[in-house]
Image (cartoon, rainbow, N blue to C red):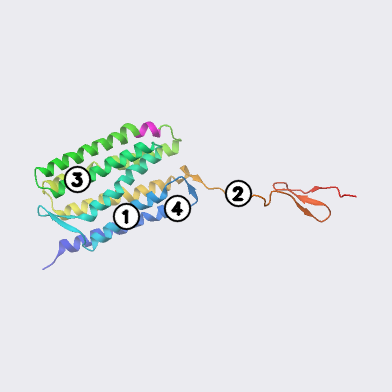
């Protein structure tokens, strides 16, 4: 007898892990590219954490049955870390205040927590959790489309364009997640295998291109210049034979009269 569902999901999660870990490459290049002010460590964590979680899912770890429906625990652990980073980084690019960045990340984290509670509970608790998660989602969309644009408007045009790309990439794509949850773990109208395939595809699309968008617009970040010379070195002229000395930035030496 063939165990095709298990084999299929192993393949799907393996492909997802590879595609997500590919997303670490541009983030690593940004880290080593001499750019300042990019917070690229947070950016790197997005595909790295997600990729590691998919490696674990590919090996079959952490799957739990809730109401007879298998749910990988790693998926919610991944989302609890990476989705606040996706939202918070978009807010950071838009130049939002630290209060708004943290507030958006917290709203996102609560959305994931209540979504996890909704998966674990039987009705009616399931639907209460889903409603709470949906309210957090709506508040998050309010920040992304009600508050973020006013901050982004004050940024230079290229940074404003990047903020808008990240805003729409997160805001529009995530509209599909509650729909998948509703027909998957909620109503159980579609199989866990189908949900796993769809979610893997959406996770890859949500995270790997996101990092690439930042890398492609890397000129919005300040490029570190050459290191300034240490104090006391190369700041004064160096005497040479015949009473000649050179000065930094002067192409020709200046003559210094010899003492008699």
Q: CA distance from mark 4 to mark 1?
A: 17 Å
Do the residues under discs 4 and 1 have CB atoms within 8 angstroms? Answer: no
For the magenta stretch, what is the residue range? 148-152
**Which corner quadrant of the image does residue 196 belong to?**
bottom left
Nearest to the observer: residue 258 or residue 91 = 258
Q: CA distance from mark 2 to mark 4?
A: 21 Å
**Which corner quadrant of the image does residue 65 belong to?**
bottom left
Q: CA distance from mark 3 to mark 1?
A: 19 Å
As drawn, is 223 to the left or to the right of 20?
right
Q: Which mark is residue 31?
A: 4
- Percent from the top left, x then y, of residue 104? 31, 39
Question: Which residue is label 3 attached to?
Answer: 115
Question: Which residue is label 2 attached to?
Answer: 228
How busy is the neighbourhood of tag 1: few (under 14 within 10 Å), some, or many (20 plus)?
many
Residue 149 counted in the magenta span: yes
As drawn, is 215 to the left or to the right of 67?
right
Q: CA distance from mark 3 to mark 4?
A: 33 Å
**Which corner quadrant of the image does residue 131 belong to?**
top left
Q: Which mark is residue 49?
A: 1
Q: What is the secondary structure assignment of the residue under circle 1?
A: helix
Nearest to the observer: residue 242 or residue 153 = 242
Residue 58 counted in the magenta span: no
């Amino acid at each position: 007898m063939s165990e095709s569902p298990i084999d299929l999901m192993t393949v799907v999660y393996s492909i997802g892990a590879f595609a997500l870990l590919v997303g670490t490459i541009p983030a690593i290049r940004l880290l080593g590219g001499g750019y300042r002010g990019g917070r690229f460590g947070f950016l790197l964590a997005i595909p790295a954490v997600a990729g590691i979680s998919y490696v674990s899912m590919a090996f079959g770890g952490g799957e739990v049955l809730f109401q007879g429906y298998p749910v990988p625990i790693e998926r919610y652990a991944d989302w609890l870390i990476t989705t606040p980073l996706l939202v918070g980084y978009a807010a950071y690019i838009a130049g939002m205040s630290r209060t708004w960045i943290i507030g958006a990340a917290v709203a996102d984290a609560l959305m994931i927590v209540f979504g996890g509670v909704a998966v674990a509970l039987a009705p009616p608790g399931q639907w209460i959790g889903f409603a709470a998660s949906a309210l957090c989602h709506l508040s998050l969309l309010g920040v992304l489309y009600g508050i973020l644009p006013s901050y982004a408007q004050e940024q230079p045009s290229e940074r404003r364009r990047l903020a808008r790309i990240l805003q729409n990439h997160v805001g529009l794509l995530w509209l599909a997640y509650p729909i998948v949850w509703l027909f998957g773990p909620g109503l159980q109208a579609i199989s866990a295998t189908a949900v796993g395939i769809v979610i893997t595809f959406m996770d890859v699309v949500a995270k790997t291109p996101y990092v690439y968008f930042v890398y492609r617009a890397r000129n919005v970040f300040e490029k570190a210049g050459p290191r300034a010379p240490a104090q006391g070195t190369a700041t004064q002229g160096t005497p040479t034979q015949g009473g000649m000395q050179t000065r930094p930035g002067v192409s020709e030496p200046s003559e210094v009269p010899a003492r008699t």
